[in-house]
Amino acid sequence: MTHFICKGGCKGVSEVEGFCEADGCPNQWQPLEACECTDGKHFVEEVEKEEVVVTKDSNGNELHDGDDVALIKDLPLRGSSTVFKRGTKVTGIRLTGNPEEVDCKLGGMSIVLRTEFLKKV
């Protein structure tokens, strides 16, 4: 079954040869490309290419939810006189959407730590 698709991002599909007429498409008014696929899954590859956020410690080891880490530097807590000493073990970290930060409980408080100051235990 021959049909025609737009490769410009609008995901347009047509049964007849022609041009992409979708407003805002980067390939607007460009010819549609012929496609002979049988399953109609033209854009599955784009979904599979979605980037996965990988969080790494200061040594480049990949971190996961629930991992134990240790501090590699004395870290003062902003706004208080508390200092978390180098070598302090932190259990059960939680990843955030930011690959440079993790959530954890330390000293009875929930805080966010930068991964550049952590190493996996």
Image (cartoon, rainbow, N blue to C red):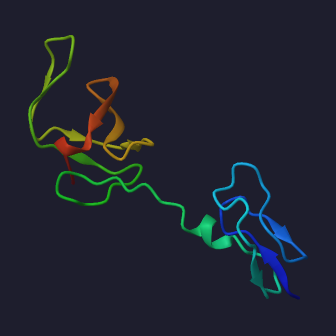
Residue at (22% x, 59% y) in the render: 60
Task: Give the camera-side residue of 53 and 2.
Answer: 2
Relative to 45, 35 lies left or right: right
Image quadrant containing the C terminus: bottom left
Q: Can residue 40 be seen in this view?
A: no
Residue at (79% x, 88% y) in the render: 36
Q: Residue at the front extreme?
A: 29
Q: Position of residue 67 (x, y in %)?
A: 34, 51
- Look at the picture and state if 46 lies above or below 86: below
Residue 62 picture quarter: bottom left
Q: Where is residue 54 in the image (x, y as percent from the top left)?
A: 38, 56
- Look at the picture and state if 34 lies above or below 9: below
Relative to 73, 20 lies left or right: right
Relative to 76, 32 lies left or right: right
Tag count in the figure?
A: 0
- Look at the picture and state if 6 lies above or below 69: below
Residue at (19% x, 11% y) in the render: 80
Residue at (35% x, 40% y) in the render: 102
Residue 104 picture quarter: top left
Task: Give the camera-side residue of 79 and 25.
Answer: 25
Image quadrant containing the N terminus: bottom right
Q: Position of residue 35 (x, y in %)?
A: 77, 83
Q: Where is residue 55 in the image (x, y as percent from the top left)?
A: 34, 52
Residue 34 picture quarter: bottom right
Task: Give the camera-side residue of 36 and 65.
Answer: 36
Q: Can residue 76 be seen in this view?
A: yes
Task: Give the camera-side residue of 119 and 39.
Answer: 39
